[in-house]
Image (cartoon, grey):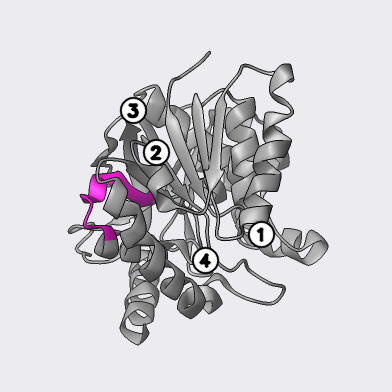
Amino acid sequence: MRCGLKIAVIGCGFVGSTTAYTLLLEGLASELVLINRDKDEVMGHALDLKEGMEFMESSKVIFGSDYKLAKECDIIVITAGAHQEKKETRLDLISKNAKIFKNIIPKITQYNKKAIMIIVTNPVDIMTYLALKYSKYPKERVFGTGTSLDTARLRCFLGNEINISPLNIHAYVLGEHGDSSFPVWSNASISGTNIKHFDKVNKKVLDKVFSKTKNAAYEVISKKGATYYAIALDICNIIKAIDHNSNRILPVSTMLNNYHGLSGVCLSVPCIINSKGIDGVIKIELDSTENEMLKRSYNVIKTALKNL
């Protein structure tokens, strides 16, 4: 079904180009704008997409390096930046990608002050903070993909372990999208029943599931150099929630305002996503260990921002 959104993807590397392709397959963009500093590369992606239009619902594909193309876009997805190399953590990308954001965010807002901005570039919590700072958009219209993919991975891996569909598992990964992320097991449930009541679930299983979740991106990067399929699908899932005004609850990176006493940095917490962007934050109950882990994530990002 044609949704009628005008969506810009800024940065046409692995993640950006795969996101563009997935948006067209999902029929989420009536107009797709590709913006990239390499004019030949963005032209190549645009031509490749256009030549496949016969096989899907027609969309208009616009491309170039001029940020004026972002004018009147409903949603702007930012994937521009250096990608994570083998043995690099997400935080290792801070200085390179901070410079890129300082350059591109004002160029976007020069032409568009009303879009919803979805940040994908890592380290996503830092980049979301900088996007808010440089754009001066309200915080409900700037957020990062955060731990939404980590959460999907956690549910998938747990479902595989206990032979239950991930659709019936309700558990979150919160905090930093990075090495200080943490699972919220204390109130995780399967169809409304706390997971502690399931015979197949024990500490060994939960530790194994989260370890696999935490290292999932590193494993993919070690095998093929970059992750891009799953994150592209994750981005499309978020955009569907916006377009359908569905009030989905997703853990995305947002500016904290007295969330369990923490404020002033961007971390992933459960948020209500609809046509406004973020339309509310769910203050999920945490046990004492999880509360300390949230503070740890907070301190990691706070320290990184001070050093930046």
Quadrant in which residue 216 is drawn: bottom right
Gap in angstroms between the C-alphas marked 3 and 2: 17 Å
Query: What residue type is disc 2 on?
Result: Ile
Q: Residues within 10 Å of mark 2 (few under 14, many from 20)?
A: many
Between residues 167 and 12, which one lies in front from this camera angle?
12
Residue farthest top in this picture: 1
Q: Which residues are magenta?
A: 135-143
Label 3: how many Cα within 10 Å (few below 14, some 14–19, many 20+): some
Is residue 273 in view from this perspective?
A: yes
Q: Crowding near pointer 1: few (<14 within 10 Å), some, many (20+)?
A: some
Q: Is residue 296 above or below residue 67?
A: below
What distance separates the C-alpha of mark 3 from that of mark 1? 28 Å
For marks 4 and 3, the one nearer the N-term is: 4
Earlier-in-chain disc, 4 versus 1: 4
> Residue 3, percent across and down?
46, 19
Residue 178: mark: 4
Foreground label between 3 and 2: 2
Are the two marked residues, 4 and 3, in contact with CB atoms closer than 8 angstroms? no
> Which label is found at residue 247?
3
Q: Amino acid at mark 4?
A: Gly
Q: Residue 248: x and y, percent? A: 39, 30
Q: Classify 251 as above or below 265.
A: above
Mark 1 against mark 2, which lies toward the viewer? 2
Q: CA distance from mark 4 to mark 3?
A: 26 Å
Question: Is 142 one of the magenta-colored residues?
Answer: yes
The tally of labels here is 4
Q: Mark on residue 217?
A: 1
Q: Residue at x 28, y 64 (%)?
A: 134
Q: Earlier in the sequence, mark 2 or mark 4?
A: 2
Q: Secondary structure at mark 2?
A: strand
| Cα–Cα span, label 4 and label 1 | 10 Å
Q: Which mark is residue 75?
A: 2
